[in-house]
């Protein structure tokens, strides 16, 4: 059973090197037919904001975005659909993540291997988050003391 919410799967999986994810997706789909419902695409997404005075839209910036949607068929009646969007300029990574999403979501053959990868990635992300929080705690400043005037 998978205890990680599906919304966190991409973040956990991308803690692993891209080549490992691509290799895992290829290994798990050796006996499957992979149909592309949305071609793997790599491009840019735009961050838009609305300014507060005249409510005009403006573009704050852009970021790399890759996406893919696949349908997996194992035999006659075992199938599933997977989706992925990842902030990276790598269409192959998006395809591999979509395949892993489909395998995990529908618990297709050998899904336990993908689940193990998922759990390992979640542990790695937790460790990174703890390190970042420790660094952030060291840089915290108390601005309340700036108002204090010495006699």
Image: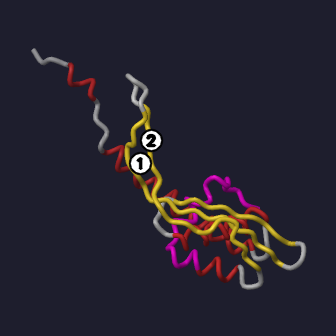
| Number of numbered discs | 2
Answer few, some or many: residues within 10 Å of disc 2's Cα (few below 14, many 20 plus, some between 14 and 19): few
As drawn, 59 above or below 132: above
Part of the protein shown in magenta: 1-22
Q: Nearer the viewer, residue 89 or 113?
A: 89
Could you tell me which secondary element the residue under label 1 belongs to? Answer: helix
Residues packed near mark 1 inside 10 Å, few (<14), some (14 to 19) or many (20 plus): few
The quarter holding residue 95 reads bottom right
Q: Nearer the viewer, mark 2 or mark 1?
A: 2
Is 50 on the left-hand or right-hand side of 121? left
- Is 33 or 23 nearer to us in this picture? 33
Dot label at residue 133? 1
Q: Quadrant of the C terminus?
A: top left
User: How far apart in space, not on screen, are marks 2 and 1 (Cα)?
Assistant: 29 Å
Which corner quadrant of the image does residue 118 belong to? bottom right
Magenta segment includes 6? yes
Q: Do callouts 2 and 1 mark residues in contact (Cβ within 8 Å)? A: no
Instruction: Give the colour scheme of this rendering.
Output: secondary structure
Tell me where residue 19 appears, x and y as whole percent.
Answer: 52, 78
Which residue is labeled 2 in the image? 48
The residue nearer to you, when weighing 150 against 127, is 127
**In-front residue for pair 20/70:** 70
Residue ID at (62%, 59%):
9
């Amino acid at each position: 059973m998978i205890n990680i919410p599906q919304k966190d799967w991409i973040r956990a999986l991308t803690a692993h090197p891209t080549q490992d994810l691509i290799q895992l997706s290829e290994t798990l789909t050796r006996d499957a037919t992979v149909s592309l419902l949305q071609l793997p695409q790599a491009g840019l997404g735009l961050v838009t904001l609305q300014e507060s005075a005249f409510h005009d839209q403006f573009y704050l910036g852009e970021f790399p975005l890759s996406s893919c949607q696949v349908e997996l068929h194992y035999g006659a009646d075992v199938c599933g659909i997977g989706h992925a969007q990842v902030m990276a300029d790598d269409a192959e990574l998006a395809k591999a993540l979509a395949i892993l999403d489909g395998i995990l979501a529908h618990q297709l053959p050998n899904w336990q291997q993908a689940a193990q990868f998922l759990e390992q990635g979640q542990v790695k992300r937790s460790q990174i988050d703890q390190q970042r929080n420790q660094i952030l705690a060291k840089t915290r400043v108390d601005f309340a003391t700036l108002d204090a005037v010495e006699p």
